[in-house]
Image (cartoon, rainbow, N blue to C red):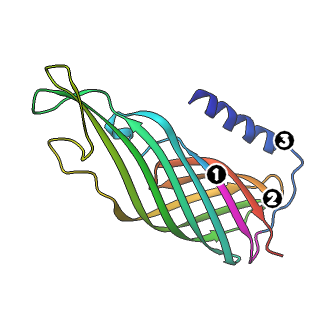
Amino acid sequence: MRKITAVLIFSIAFLSISNAQITRFEKGDIDLSAGLGLLPTFAADDGQSIIPPLSLRLDYRPAENFSIGAYAAFSSTKTKYQDIPTGDLAQWQNNFFILGLRGAAHSTRFENWDVYGGFMAGYNIAAVDQNVISEEGNGIKYEDGPLFSGPARNKFTFSGFLGAAYFPKQNLGIFGELGYGNSILNFGLSYKINGK
């Protein structure tokens, strides 16, 4: 995680030092963004991140101050071994996917800045594996989830988000976003393709 944070900081510094150009946001623009989650959705479960939260976005602006887009995200988390009611030890691994459609309103009052907020309708896909170590020492796999709860279920979800992007170069920027996804807080890079 430290290496990823260092790369992110280096990228921000490099983009800030580069020749600044005025970025205009117009109807027909397409934004492609890749993000890294710094506060995973499953942090409360005291899990260990196997693959940090990663996300991809593709947004299209049918108007200067409005965008629609697609969102895809993945993360993989593993818990520590825990006692379960049967007296055995169990560990869970959650491979979590989100696919969604987003709509956002944008404010571009400040030069090279894009401040936005919106909503997402998505579908969560949770692939949970459980490894149980019984008193006899045999590893048993249960794929339906914890023995003392219901199985993991895929479901539709609705969420909101707020974010900002800064474009020190005309088509290349950095963004930060707060909202529900595979991470509560995301940072990353954006590439803007001009519509005209």
Q: Is residue 59 above or below residue 127?
A: below
Residue tagged 3: 17
Q: Earlier in the sequence, mark 3 or mark 2?
A: 3
Which residue occupies the foreground of this view, 140 or 103?
140
Q: Which residues are magenta?
A: 25-34
Q: Is residue 112 left or right of residue 68?
A: right
Q: Earlier in the sequence, mark 2 or mark 1?
A: 1
Rounded to the nearest angstrom, the CA distance separating label 2 from label 1 is 14 Å
Q: Is residue 75 left or right of residue 148?
A: right
Point out residue 17 in the picture as x, y percentages from the top left corner.
Answer: 84, 41
Q: Amino acid at mark 3?
A: Ile
Point out residue 127 in the picture as x, y percentages from the top left corner.
Answer: 36, 48
Residue tagged 1: 34
Residue drawn at point x = 73 percent, y = 41 percent = 12
SS type, badge 2:
loop
Residue drawn at point x = 61 percent, y = 60 percent = 57
Residue drawn at point x = 59 percent, y = 27 percent = 2
Q: Is residue 129 left or right of residue 165?
A: left
Question: What residue occupies the far left of the structure in this picture?
Answer: 86
Q: Which mark is residue 171?
A: 2
Q: In the rendered structure, are the residues bearing label 3 and label 2 in contact, judged by CB atoms less than 8 Å apart?
A: no
